[in-house]
Image (cartoon, grey):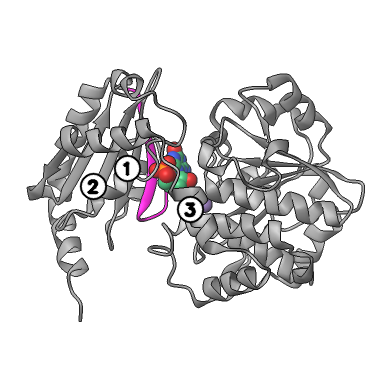
Amino acid sequence: MKICPEAASGVSRVGMSAVASLKKIIFAEKKLAINHFHQIKALLVPGTRVLITTHANPDGDAVGASLALKAYFSKLGIISDILVPNDYPSFLAWMPGIDQVVVFKRNESLAMKLAGDAKLVFCLDFNGLSRVEKMQKIWPLITVPLVMIDHHPQPEEASFALMISETATSSTSELVYNFIEMSGDKELIDKSMAECLFVGIATDTGSFSYSCGYPETFHVVADLISKGIDPERIHRLVYDNYSEHRMRLLGYCLSEKLTVLHQFNTAYIYLSKEDLKRFHFQVGDTEGVVNYALSIDGICMAVLFTEKDNHVRMSLRSKGQFSVNEFVRNHFEGGGHKNAAGGNSYLSMDETLRKFEALLPQYQELLKNCCVLCKDYQ
Ligand code: 5GP
Ligand code: MN
């Protein structure tokens, strides 16, 4: 078990006065240090107004973990609100409780009020304050402790009063389950909460195809299924609901916009604003596209470049030992996990692609070796 050293003086930008005596927690091997755990729990008194926030472009894990945590708090008599920076994808719109989620981009004044009124703030599925993008406006209004629950590497420790940070897990949703379990409240997890947690675990593991080598994850999933959820129905709701436009956009990406650089074991797809317009792009429509590029035999790194208003958004995936997290951190202002990361380029699309291609020769050996290892079935 790894416990972070005591929060160094002045280490947290937010709310340190209220939690000067609290220590940060690194929650390793899924065993919370009991004394620190009680300190988090001590903040969760009935009547406390809690705000739950997530990263921008909230995904199944961010939304699932938040909805389950809110439902749990409600059972403890703790009022909470969920605030997300921008819209969640429509394939999550069926999730229990999602109608109460406040979207910063749509209701900035309510978002600012919630931030100002909160007595405790949870940050779920992100570990750096800039990950909320335009919603960063709320941070100066918050003088209460920020509690992070997340599974990404390299947390921005200075920004959080308390951290539950574990990378050896499937998802933040699994960590929320662990948190409830550690509280002795597993029995409070009802079917709706189980559905939310299942969505988080299933989507963050690509339906149990990566980040799923932990036996505990399957114990958690078994318990969620015992709560009466229907995994097949959830899979249908999340995955089998493409609009016609989304399906045609996928076809276009694969037939017209895919570049395969076999010599670098790399493939990429890029989408301009015109492409997105042509296919009536909705939030979530490019979700999963990059995985198709990665699933080509011999490809160890895949990237989707999407043109936004003032930057190019990058979504990266890799196989095996090649770390796209390191790659984007070093070159494209981003981060994430070893095999799934996101980044940003403030160059034009053309310049971004040129910069990307120019970087590949220095990674050629690494990518090649990675591919050889990926094929090693011994
Ligand atoms: P996606 O490609 O699905 O947007 O993101 C892949 C993973 O990387 C997710 O776990 C996501 O949270 C993380 N991620 C995406 N963009 C960024 C970014 O700009 N910075 C950091 N630190 N992580 C990111
Ligand atoms: Mn996640």
Counting residues from the N terminus, which is met first, the one under dot 3 or under dot 2? 3
Cβ of disc 3 within 8 Å of ligand 1? Answer: no
Task: Report the Cα–Cα distance between label 1 and label 3.
Answer: 18 Å
Disc nearest the viewer among 1 and 3: 3
User: Camera-side residue: 51 or 284?
Assistant: 284
Tell me if 132 is positioned left or right of 361 in this view: right
Q: Is residue 7 above or below residue 56?
A: below
Q: Is residue 134 above or below residue 251?
A: above
Q: Which span of residues is magenta-colored?
A: 335-346
* Image position, residue 286 (x, y; %): 37, 37
* Image position, residue 44 (x, y; %): 84, 54
Q: Secondary structure at mark 2?
A: helix
Q: Which residue is mark 3?
A: 236
Image quarter of the C terminus: bottom left
Kind of residue sitting beneath label 1:
Val
Residue positioned 70% across, 27% down in the render: 140
Q: Which residue is mark 1?
A: 289
Kind of residue sitting beneath label 3:
Arg
* Image position, residue 331 (x, y; %): 30, 37
Residue positioned 57% across, 70% down in the render: 221
* Image position, residue 272 (x, y; %): 28, 23
Kind of residue sitting beneath label 2:
Ala
Q: Is residue 182 above or below residue 346?
A: below
Q: Is residue 70 above or below residue 273?
A: below
Q: Quadrant of ligand 1?
A: top left
Task: Report the Cα–Cα distance between label 2 and label 1.
Answer: 7 Å
Q: Which residue is mark 2?
A: 293
Q: Secondary structure at mark 3?
A: helix
Residue at far right of view: 47
